[in-house]
Image: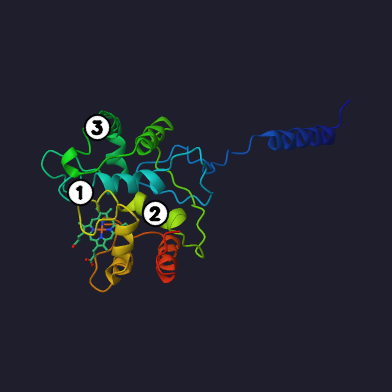
Amino acid sequence: MIKPHRIFVGLFVITTMAIACHHKPDIIEPNPNGNGNIPDTIIVVNPDPCSPDTVYFQNTILPFVNSNCAMSGCHDSNGSGEADPYTTYSQIRSNRNDMLEEMQQGTMPPQSSGITLTADQITQFQLWIQQGAQNNSCQEDCDPTQGSFATNVAPIIETYCVGCHGSNSPSLENYAQISAAAADPSFMNSLHGINGSPIMPQNTTGLPDCQIQQIQNWIDAGRPNN
Ligand code: HEC
């Protein structure tokens, strides 16, 4: 005959096992590749380094669209005339397929803007769509002690400035133009948004500190074409 206290011990063991076997709730971690299902307007600050296979909205697509499409009179926040505004993630996400088609057909940006997108820029936009058009970001590998023109400065200007600064003064399309513009104090003033210069890139809160420092290093070194 089973004694009552044995039944009690048995139940205790079974209950303990049942609790131990119960699944822990899944912890939802941010996806290191930024491919998680990220809600609309939240800017994800992802501390992970950039993966060369992923196109990131915050790092590449937004600066590209800002510089090449969202200048004043075009797809800016006022949405001038017929043009849809392309200044936020939701706006760019909803219009992404039309945007890609126009870029591929060469109808946007219009010829009159003087902007010619590179094949690589269009491919990046297409890849971003194929990867789920996420509002993703990553930590760029940036060394604040560097300041080479070709490795650091030119890519920053290409990503963040050149679309607007083909037609808007100062022109920043090649070494000679960038160097001439950077000889004027208004260049660094505009990167900091100080001394009466509007903050650049326009429509943003400015470049990351490390990129500003690299440009400063290059200017301090005498703006070499290195
Ligand atoms: C969305 C378009 C846009 C982008 C992107 C942009 N600019 Fe500008 N920039 C302008 C416009 C428009 C002006 C004229 C603004 C004014 O005079 O109020 C201007 C003015 C300037 C000036 C003159 C400032 C002064 O004090 O007169 C400098 C220098 C400049 N930009 C540098 C840059 C650099 C460097 C970048 C990239 C890091 C950049 N801009 C990105 C549109 C843009």
Position of the N terminus by quadrant: top right
Q: Nearer the viewer, residue 210 or 13?
A: 210
Cα gap from disc 3 to disc 2, whole angstroms: 24 Å
Q: Quadrant of the rendered structure where residue 182 is?
A: bottom left
Q: Is residue 39 visible?
A: yes
Position of the C terminus by quadrant: bottom left
What residue is disc 1 on?
77
**Mark 2: few/some/many CA within 10 Å (<14, 14-19, 20+):** some
Label 1's element?
loop
Q: Kindly report which numbered mark, 2 or 1, lies closer to the viewer in this rendering.
A: 2
Q: Quadrant of the rendered structure where residue 84 is?
A: top left
| In contact (CB < 8 Å): disc 2 and disc 1 | no
The amino acid on which the numbered mark 1 sits, given as a three-letter code, is Ser
What residue is disc 3 on?
106
Q: Is residue 105 above or below residue 47?
A: above
Lower sequence index among marks 3 and 1? 1
The spot of residue 62 in percent (x, y) is 34, 46
The amino acid on which the numbered mark 3 sits, given as a three-letter code, is Gly
Q: Is residue 97 above or below residue 161?
A: above
Q: Quadrant of the rendered structure where residue 2 is?
A: top right
What residue is disc 2 on?
154
The spot of residue 128 in percent (x, y) is 40, 36
Residue appearing at x 66%, y 34% in the figure: 22
Q: Kindly report which numbered mark, 3 or 1, lies closer to the viewer in this rendering.
A: 3
**Mark 3: few/some/many CA within 10 Å (<14, 14-19, 20+):** few
19 lies left or right of 185: right
The spot of residue 206 in percent (x, y) is 34, 60
